[in-house]
Amino acid sequence: MHRDLPTGTVTFLFTDVEGSTRLLHELGAEEYAAALAEHRQVIRRAGAAHGGVEVDAQGDSLFAAFPTAAGAVSAAAEITRGLAAGPIRVRIGLHTGTPLVTDRAYVGRDVHLAARIAAAGHGGQVLVSGTTAALEPGAELRDLGEHRLKDFDGPVTIFQLGNDAFAPLRTSSTTNLPRPAGAFVGRDSELEDVLARVGGGARLLTLTGPGGCGKSRLAIEAAAALVPAFAAGVFWVGLAPLREPARVLGAIGLALGARDGVAEHVGERELLVVLDNFEHVVAAAPDVSGLVSACPNLTVIVTSRERLNVTGEAELQVPPLAESEAVALFCERAQIDPSAEIAELCRRLDALPLAVELAAARTKALSPRQILERLSQRLDLLAGGRDADPRQQTLRATMEWSYQLLSDPEKRLFPRLSVFSGGFGLDAALAVAGADLDTVQSLVEKSLLRFSNERYAMLETVREFAAERLDPEEADGVRRLHRAYVVALAAASAPRLYTAEEAAVSAQLAPDYANVRAAVSHALAEREPDDVGRILGALYPFLISHGDLAEVRAWGEAALEARDRLSETGRAETLVGTSEIARFGGDLDRARELKEELATVQVELQRPNWRAATLADLCELALDQGNFAAARTYAEQSAAAGAGARAELCFAELALRTGDVASAESHGLAALGGLAEGAFNHATTLELLGEAARRAGDVERARERFADALHAFAALNDGGGIADSLDGLGRIAATVGDATRAGRLLGVAERLRETRGRRPIRADLPLPEVPATARDEGRAIALEDALAYALGIGA
């Protein structure tokens, strides 16, 4: 035995130079050797001064033993001070034990533990085991919590000498979090929300959302940020492999290294545990809740497609990415620059992170445009690599995982709801899919349905999967029920679309535009055009304001091509809607042809006072085609048929087109008094009066009336009417010499008409000459900003 080695209870001190290879490169061999020799002298002097004995010195490391913990701690502090001014910084580890002493050496786990503690630190940092800290209570020690060290089963409590700030220790104990290969993109607000919830005291936080929405990735990032806040560590427990809820606590215990029960092991330790993929073992929720209650310093973050529904749970719903975040994620994974095609691709993938990442992986073989063209096979097209979680190798696998967890009633309802496009209300689900509230709510809780503003909706990716699960034998029956629901909705809405309620009704109908499209498509496919007519005849004011006129007109023309299957009422309703849509779309000859046929119909229709209204429509068509004599005849006939204020509007427009501005004003005011405020024709009259004032030279009154018309058309979301009002304001701006403002307003109007397929109401009146640059600027302005600009708000 070496006669100088302390025996019995011994405190070991290990030192190691941080960044020795870098220092050698920076200082050069000779200067580094001199610095290394000087640093050893500092260590040896400090050790000898406090009773230490050098045991070994190899390369950049030195091992010493002390008969007392106090001597070792004092020596470590002196070493740190002695090296502070030089280029070399050492990490130091201390641990106390009772090793076996052999010839010139120590043997035992305490020696290895001291070395592992030293290796976990950073240059200038002194780490002290809990055993040593207990023997030196007067030292200034900071508790760094429990850590796991290589080759040691249980956690080790480590303290730091002094209060200087260092990076987290290099231990495997602080966390077993997975290390994703790709960068974390976006989700700044969601990450802040998770951290705020935990920081605010939430101890059981469930991140919910559909498969592929990024719950696990968000949990990893949040947990990594929270590592410094939990002294006993942050642990990840993946539950996907489990099949029995009873095994959840065992999986937690295995991750934590618990031997005598999880609650007993956790005790009062400050721990964060992340439970990933809880949805298939949700029956274990009370066990987790009980564990949190029993352990006052335990926090649990759960990722699940449904909430746990236990006391004390906080829920954070993880939405799809924002569009800009989805594009950034795609480009980061694919290593390509953003483009309009990528933005469209991300939109059609619902901005689901998993779908975006799988699509990005396809860019090794397909361009973004080619991926877009193949999106109808998205569930199989988008596949991950061999190292992907089997549940997420394709979108289909992700959806299948959720589907297999459903109860039988949920499996029956989920596919039926796929017949809805763009969402649905509870009444629609009850009428079409035979839903019940409890099952609908359960699908919401399992993240297969989303609920907002009193409507339910599926992500398109989810809906595509659900549609595949719809039994072919019941599919047509469910679609017929869906079509019947839309027809009934149209019939109930029709009387209110000609009143002051038009704007409110149109706003209520807007979310169901996609359902209208689906119902019409089914009716045409089944060669049952009467339902197309019922929908068009009832909803054409809404469809003109909100729809794609080319698409909507195609519905009507397709129904008219099946005349042999149309009832007389169905033919008439189709003529009502299709003629108006053709007129507003600019095909005046076709509109007149259809309206002349409509005038011969002998049945009653959904449009109030439809005969008089049809004559008024023919008057307006004649005006647009420059046939003023025919226009006057139709106006007089419409007045005789009881058109009332609508006939006054016809006479006002006729007077304006023929240059009688005073008559246009008087007839316009008469029409305005008889039309329901908020209805389309009321807004149209405001625009006409604005134009009458402009032609009369009353700029201020014209501006005021065009602004009122703009407000009215905006409430209706009528792009064509908005454009007509902007034209009027643009002409005024040109008249007063503001060509730039005129150009911007006309540019907005131009873009709106292209988007909606609408012709200008004043097609006979040439637009002023404006700078092309100003027009282009207007085309680029968002509609909300354009309205504010036109009305002088913030201008």
Image: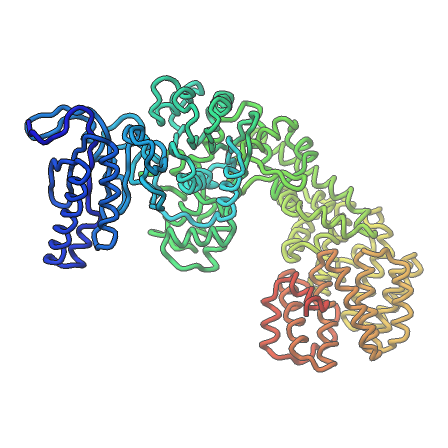
Q: Is residue 19 visible?
A: yes
Residue 742 point in image, percent of width and height:
68, 75
Query: Is 36 on the left or on the right of 144, as rendered?
Result: left
Picture quarter with the C terminus: bottom right
Residue 118 point in image, percent of width and height:
23, 38
Q: Is residue 235 visible?
A: no
Picture quarter with the N terminus: top left
Marker count (numbered):
0
* Residue closest to the eye, 166 or 247: 166
In the rendered image of this protein, does residue 425 appear above or below residue 561?
A: above
* Residue closest to the eye, 261 or 140: 140
Residue depicted at 28% across the width and 44% down the height: 125
- Residue 779, picture quadrant: bottom right
User: As drawn, which residue projects farthest toward the right?
Assistant: 640
Query: Is 237 on the left or on the right of 575, as rendered?
Result: left
Residue 390 point in image, percent of width and height:
37, 34
Residue depicted at 10% across the width and 58% down the height: 30
Residue 689 point in image, percent of width and height:
83, 69
* Residue closest to the eye, 86 or 219: 86
- Residue 106, picture quadrant: top left
- Residue 113, picture quadrant: top left
User: As drawn, which residue projects farthest toward the front?
Assistant: 49
Q: How is the image coloured?
A: rainbow
Residue depicted at 71% across the width and 74% down the height: 730
